[in-house]
Image: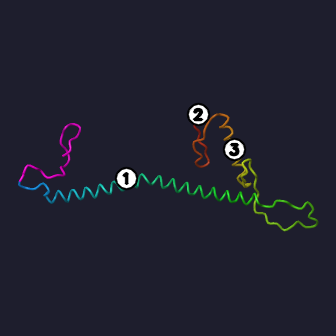
């Protein structure tokens, strides 16, 4: 039998009453055993559901991080290939330019990464914003979507 904070008895006792010493304590009424088994079964489901609910955001974060890692590795591989591309051209082509296939335009950044030409305006805006934050002593807290959310350092 449990006792709540007010001293009142509440809940059900999980052991048989010891008032009748003729009956062994191991023999509980059949209805109590069934109720106890149902409660144990429900408790097991609640614990499992609670654990799953707590693990779901972690699994979502892991999947997001996996996707980011794949993206970073793809960009790193592209940057590595761009660093190895022969970019020298003959100064005199004569009547005809040599046959070459254009695969894209990129700008080499200060950190030796490559930015595709279609991302240059976005990259410049990000860098301008970040330089302003560094000068103002603010720290970006999130770059969700296209917005940049700020937190003031104190």
As displayed, is residue 47 above or below residue 137? below
Give the quarter of the image for residue 49.
Answer: bottom left
Between 120 and 11, the one nearer to me in the picture: 11
Disc 2 target residue? 153
Query: 137 left or right of 60?
Result: right
Q: Residue furthest top?
A: 154
| Magenta segment main secondary structure | loop
Tell me the residue at 59%/56% (across/down).
69
Along the polypeptide, which appears first: circle 1 or circle 3? 1
Q: Is residue 151 left or right of residue 112?
A: left
Closer to the N terminus: mark 2 or mark 1? 1
**Residue drawn at (29%, 56%), measured in percent from left and top?**
42
Report whether 141 appears left or right of 87.
left
Q: Would residue 131 be counted in the magenta stretch?
A: no
- Badge 3 marks a residue whose secondary structure is helix
Region of the chain picked out in magenta, as a range: 1-21
Q: Secondary structure at mark 2?
A: loop
Q: Position of residue 107 (x, y in %)?
A: 76, 52
Where's residue 57, x and y in %?
A: 47, 52
* Residue denoted by label 1: 50
Whole-angstrom CA distance, mark 1 to mark 3, is 43 Å
Residue in the foreground of this view, choosing between 6 and 150: 6
Q: CA distance from mark 2 to mark 1?
A: 37 Å
11 sits left or right of 62 in the view:
left
Please report the residue visible at 20 percent of the width from the left and 60 percent of the height from the top: 34
Q: Secondary structure at mark 1?
A: helix
Q: Earlier in the sequence, mark 2 or mark 3?
A: 3
Distance from Cα at disc 2 to Cα at disc 3: 20 Å
Q: What label sits on residue 127 in the rendered view?
A: 3
The residue that appears at 74% across and 59% down in the rendered structure is 82
């Amino acid at each position: 039998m449990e006792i709540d904070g007010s001293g009142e008895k509440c809940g059900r006792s999980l052991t048989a009453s010891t008032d009748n010493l003729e009956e062994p304590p191991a023999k509980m009424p059949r209805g109590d055993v069934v109720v106890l088994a149902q409660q144990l079964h429900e408790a097991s489901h609640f614990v499992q559901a609670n654990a799953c609910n707590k693990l779901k955001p972690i699994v979502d974060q892991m999947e997001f991080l996996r996707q980011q890692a794949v993206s970073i590795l793809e960009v790193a591989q592209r940057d590595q290939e761009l660093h190895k591309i022969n970019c020298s051209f003959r100064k005199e082509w004569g009547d005809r330019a040599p046959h070459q296939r254009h695969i894209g335009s990129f700008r080499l950044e200060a950190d030796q990464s490559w930015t595709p030409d279609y991302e240059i305006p976005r990259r410049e805006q990000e860098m301008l914003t970040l330089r302003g934050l560094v000068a103002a002593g603010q720290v970006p807290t999130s770059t969700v979507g296209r917005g940049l959310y700020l937190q003031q350092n104190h």
